[in-house]
Image: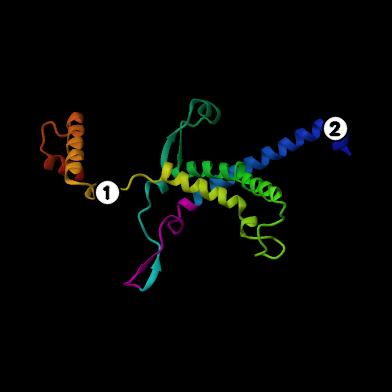
Amino acid sequence: MRSCLFPKRRTRDSRNYWTLFYSLSFGYTEQLSYVMSGWRYFVCPVEFNNDSNRFQVDCEPSELFQLQDYALPSVLESFTGWTTVRLYPFQIHSIALSSFASIMGPFGGFFTSGFKRAFKIKDFANTIPGHGGIMDRFDCQYLMATFVNVYIPSFIRGPDPSKVIQQLLALRIDQQFHIFNSLKAHLTEKGILAEKGILQALEDVMA
């Protein structure tokens, strides 16, 4: 009754509810990613130990799962009174992933619904009785999986030196010499090879 008599209030209440929902979801995502990043069970691969004849989860976490200090922007600094915050880098990536999942993910369902309406079909298949096929249940996940597949190599996973070396060794000798001379000129320009030999510079870098 109150919603019918006061439509503006109903709109304002709806906005408040959605604001509260997104705020709680954001806080839950950050807290959950913080807790999970501190457990090696979630950040280390499962490997089989021949000595103990059992699977184990033990590794040195990558920089993605190590606490780091971040300087806050002036706007947030004046609002919170903090100059820096201590976070896992993964928490920053979790914001992007969760935001895409909540905002853009549902559009996968909209697209598949429009696709089915265009062909005048109810479901893509009847694999799951009463619920259609796999595509009907995982329409949003396909869009999210595509985003994650692009996001990880673009913003999280850096170049692998071993793969770079393998690619270099696959080149012709003249191409390898060209890359060697380019790298040598670059290091000389930076001053790394100015007064040292190549072997001495490599020893200083590896030390």
Residue 195 seen in this snapshot: yes
Q: As drawn, which residue projects farthest toward the bottom?
A: 53
Instruction: Give the camera-side residue of 143 and 93.
Output: 143
The percent coordinates of residue 195 (x first, y second) are 10, 32
The percent coordinates of residue 10 (x first, y second) are 80, 35
User: In the displayed structure, would residue 95 be above or below residue 55?
Assistant: above
Three-letter amino acid code at the position of disc 1: Gln
Q: Earlier in the sequence, mark 1 or mark 2?
A: 2
Q: CA distance from mark 1 to mark 2?
A: 68 Å
Q: In the rendered image, which quarter is residue 191 located in?
A: top left
Q: As drawn, which residue projects farthest toward the front?
A: 119
User: In the displayed structure, would residue 58 be above or below residue 85?
Assistant: below
Between circles 1 and 2, the one closer to the viewer is 1
The percent coordinates of residue 18 (x first, y second) are 69, 39
Instruction: Give the camera-side residue of 85 and 161.
Output: 161
Q: Residue at x 63, y 40 (%)?
A: 23
The secondary structure type at the circle numbered 1 is helix
Say whether marks 1 and 2 touch (CB < 8 Å). Answer: no
Which residues are the magenta region?
Answer: 36-52
In this image, 193 relative to 123: left or right?
A: left
Q: Residue at x 80, y 30 (%)?
A: 8
Q: Residue at x 62, y 56 (%)?
A: 135
The percent coordinates of residue 89 (x first, y second) are 44, 43
Three-letter amino acid code at the position of disc 2: Phe
Instruction: Give the camera-side residue of 125 and 142.
Output: 125
Residue located beneath label 2 in the image: 6
Residue located beneath label 1 in the image: 167
